[in-house]
Image (cartoon, rainbow, N blue to C red):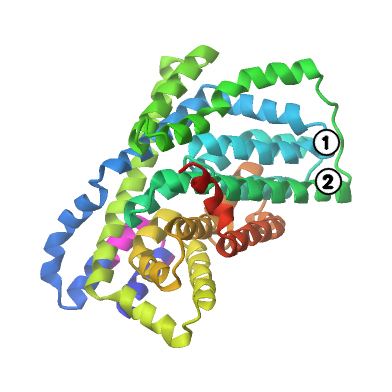
């Protein structure tokens, strides 16, 4: 398998997109290892990788988020968060974190969240006297909540590949998402006091009530999804369709959705969805190669030769996923490593839902971790700050997310309490 990893690393270093690097390296390895005839099966494997009904939730949830965004919901969420916490010292930093949490319940995508909120909030924080690099880092790390607070595209992929309940995974993400938000809010408050960020005027009670009324219809979407799935009213796929219909209704009620904006949302959704499905199809090739060469068994045996302590295995697994997350995006990681992950889940005896949360947290934290954290590059481009400065500001924020990851791994109730209550 060394030749596969060398080929894959070489393609990535030369700038080949991840999806093509996965597919070409996997195909080349089959020919190099004398299994060239197996390559004839690859088109069938690619189609089988994406021919799953539950994957329809991805474009539907993305479309719901895009409709909310072009329909003015993003601006309403920011205004609502400002009404709640904008009066605090350095209030726009707290507004950014709360807005990320609220928007996470709509988009399910970290990159969409960083792009949508970053363009609004990074300039606002800079105008309030905060360093642009700090503003960019705060948006990048806060956007990690996008794939954690339901709905979550990453959790859908994990559920499809592992067989875990997507509804249970959605519920399991609520408390970890809130924990990350609380940790970031505490840091933002401390940073505001230390650096003497300015204080803005508090909105009147009447203004706060008005903003709450304007935003509430959008904020209850996650509750509709979660309650509907757990009550058996609809499946995750049907929930995604309900989310699209609800987003259309909200946009029409707000009178911000026009045919042109709906068309823009559909185009954006098609582009993102096709890229996700293409990555999924290409990664299926590598999954086939790994299964053929019994890579999961080899890695499991190698790790067991180091230690058979479940806690040490869990620690090594976390380090393995965090390192992968520095270079690959979550969907590729899940498809590549799922056979390995399922073996380790059985070895350590962790609840499948809790294990899913640990895996998802590892992969999404990597999106804000250097050297290839895509969220850092998105917010760096929006702010105009060098990515090295953004990375320096992001380090303590990433440490908070890692602390939450440790708690989720060590304290089962942090991820299992709400699923247990809803059973």
Quadrant where the N terminus sits is: bottom left
User: 245 above or below 156?
Assistant: above
Q: Give the range drawn in magenta.
A: 13-25
Horizontal and vertical percent position of residue 326: 52, 63
- Discs 2, 1 touching: Cβ within 8 Å: yes
Quadrant where the C terminus sits is: top left
Question: Which of these two is toward me, 354 or 21?
Answer: 354
Q: Which of marks 2 and 1 is nearer the N terminus?
A: 1
Residue 23 among those drawn in magenta: yes
Q: Report which residue position mark 2 lands on.
A: 192
Horizontal and vertical percent position of residue 256: 52, 16
Question: Which of these two is toward me, 216 or 97?
Answer: 216
Q: Which residue is drawn at 36% across and 47% down?
A: 276
Based on the displayed image, in which of its 4 quarters is residue 64 positioned? top left
Query: For the residues marked 2 and 1, what is the alpha-carbon distance in whole angstroms?
Result: 9 Å
Using the rendered image of the protein, determine whether residue 350 is visible from the camera's viewpoint: yes
Q: Residue at x 25, y 52 (%)?
A: 49
Question: Which of these two is toward me, 19 or 156?
Answer: 156
Q: What element carries label 2?
A: helix
Q: Report which residue position mark 1 lands on.
A: 88
**Dot 2 alpha-carbon crowd within 10 angstroms: few under 14, some 14 to 19, many 20 or more:** many
């Amino acid at each position: 398998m060394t030749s596969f990893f060398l080929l894959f690393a070489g393609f990535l270093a030369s700038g080949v997109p991840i999806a093509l690097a996965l597919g070409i390296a996997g195909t080349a390895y089959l020919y190099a290892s004398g299994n060239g005839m197996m390559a004839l099966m690859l088109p069938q494997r690619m189609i089988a990788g994406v021919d799953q009904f539950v994957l329809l939730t991805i474009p539907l949830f993305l479309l719901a988020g895009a409709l909310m965004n072009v329909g003015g919901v993003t601006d309403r969420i920011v205004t609502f968060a400002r009404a709640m916490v904008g009066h605090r010292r350095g209030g726009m930093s707290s507004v950014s974190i709360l807005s990320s949490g609220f928007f996470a319940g709509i988009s399910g995508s970290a990159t969409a969240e960083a792009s949508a909120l970053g363009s609004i909030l990074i300039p606002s924080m800079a105008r309030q006297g905060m360093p642009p690099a700090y503003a960019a880092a705060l948006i990048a790390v806060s956007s990690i909540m996008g794939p954690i607070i339901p709905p979550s595209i990453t959790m859908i992929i994990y559920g499809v590949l592992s067989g875990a309940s997507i509804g249970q995974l959605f519920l399991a993400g609520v408390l970890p998402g809130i924990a990350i938000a609380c940790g970031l809010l505490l840091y933002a408050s401390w940073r505001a006091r230390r650096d003497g960020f300015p204080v803005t005027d508090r909105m009147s009670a009447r203004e706060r009530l008005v903003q709450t009324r304007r935003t509430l219809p959008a904020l209850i979407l996650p509750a509709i999804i979660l309650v509907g799935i757990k009550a058996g009213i609809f499946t995750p796929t049907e929930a995604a369709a309900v989310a699209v219909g609800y987003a259309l209704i909200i946009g029409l009620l707000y009178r911000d959705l026009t045919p042109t904006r709906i068309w823009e949302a559909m185009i954006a959704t098609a582009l993102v969805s096709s890229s996700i499905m293409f990555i999924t199809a290409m990664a299926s090739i590598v999954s086939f190669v790994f299964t053929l060469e019994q890579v999961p068994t080899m890695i499991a045996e190698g790790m067991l030769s180091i230690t058979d302590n479940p806690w040490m295995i869990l620690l090594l697994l976390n380090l393995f996923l965090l390192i992968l997350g520095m270079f690959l995006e979550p969907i590729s990681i899940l498809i590549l490593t799922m056979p390995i992950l399922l073996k380790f889940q059985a070895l350590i005896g962790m609840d499948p839902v809790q294990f899913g949360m640990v895996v998802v947290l590892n992969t999404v934290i990597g999106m804000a971790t250097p050297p290839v954290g895509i969220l850092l590059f998105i917010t760096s481009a929006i702010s105009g700050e060098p990515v090295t400065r953004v990375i320096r500001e992001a380090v303590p924020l990433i440490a908070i997310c890692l602390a939450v990851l440790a708690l989720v791994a060590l304290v089962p109730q942090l991820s299992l309490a709400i699923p247990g209550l809803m059973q």
